Amino acid sequence: MIGFHINMNVAQFRRSYLEDWLGELARLGYDTIIWELENNIAWQTCPECVSPDAFSKDEFGEILALSDKLGFNSIPLFQTIGHCEYVLKHDKYKPLAEVRSRIDQYCPRNPDVIDFLDRWIDEYLELFGALKYFHLGADEAYTLGRCDKCAAYVNDNSLSQLFIDHINILSQPLTSRGITPIIWCDMLLKHPEAMDMAGPLYESFKRVAEQGGADCPDVVVLPSLGPDPTVFGQALATWLATVPRPLGVLAYGDIFAGHFVAHCQEAGASVPEEVAVMGLGNKRQFCK
């Protein structure tokens, strides 16, 4: 997969501009488009948020048809916890906010939020048609756990489980249709304690990996690098001693992949002969 993220929360792109870009991206060898549409489609679920210059569904459907004709796999990106300013700025939707004085995050313990997002996801599915992947966003939820309901849940469980429960609920209708849910990784990396609860996400990843010939172990949560990297190094060495080699590791970024390689070498594991490490950015300065 070689993907390009078209982020329409920063601008309302003209149809001709998008069609020209799709042609250029196909020429450059891209095969996947991530469409972050926000308020730039005439949505029925949230008509109040629709931009005056939004595409009609028929018009954007024609853009998707061109994308399909050019061989692209389309992935919708719909923000389902944070980055919802274009919705919560409207008085009608302020009760869905985690913090009433802010407009940047939904409350994951509010059942009205789940119903609202489920209906909107259904509208995305109707617009995009058959899909392999659906991106649920879910990054930078900085006020997670602030409202009374969420704070009580966190006190009994954890911020990690609060976040993962929300994503699992939204993922279930997708996985039941055979669609693989995707999220950004920052919140799981910051709050990994309940990672083993992320069933639908991990099962989707495992299914795709195994289709490619990989043998996926159970979820393993290592401590973050933090201010004392020796803690991570010790945990990594313990984990490496329990898994068969050779093995492959997909790191969430090139900088982390570099740290991972260094700690593997300190633990006596040969890279890449015993442990192959791949970062997501593929930046040359980190890959030498």
Image: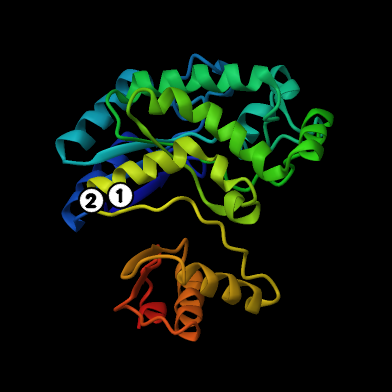
Tell which of 209 and 279 is nearer to you: 209
What residue would you read off at disc 2? 212
Q: Is residue 191 above or below residue 37?
A: below
Q: Can the viewer see residue 127?
A: yes
Give the crowd class for mark 2: few <14, some 14-19, many >=20 residues within 10 Å: few
Q: Is residue 111 above or below residue 272?
A: above
What residue would you read off at disc 1? 209
Q: Quadrant of residue 225?
A: bottom right
In the image, taking residue 2 as reference, residue 103 lies left or right, namely: right
Residue drawn at x 29%, y 23% as measured from the top left: 129
Q: Can the viewer see residue 136?
A: no
Q: Is residue 124 above or below residue 14?
A: above
Tell which of 52 and 152 is nearer to you: 152
Residue drawn at x 49%, y 82% as measured from the top left: 267
Name the element at disc 1.
helix
* Distance in Å between CA atoms under marks 2 and 1: 5 Å
User: Decide: marks 2, 1 in contact (CB < 8 A)?
Assistant: yes
Give the percent coordinates (x, y) of residue 125.
37, 22
Residue drawn at x 46%, y 35% as measured from the top left: 200
In the image, taking residue 251 as reference, residue 93 lies left or right, namely: right
Q: Is residue 262 above or below residue 171?
A: below
Give the percent coordinates (x, y) of residue 205.
38, 45
Q: Amino acid at mark 2?
A: Gly
Give the percent coordinates (x, y) of residue 141.
66, 44
In the image, taking residue 36 as reference, residue 57 lies left or right, namely: left
Name the element at disc 2.
loop
Q: Amino acid at mark 1?
A: Ala
Residue drawn at x 22%, y 41% as measured from the top left: 72
Q: Which mark is residue 107?
A: none
In the image, taking residue 279 as reference, residue 139 lies left or right, namely: right
Q: Quadrant of residue 208?
A: top left
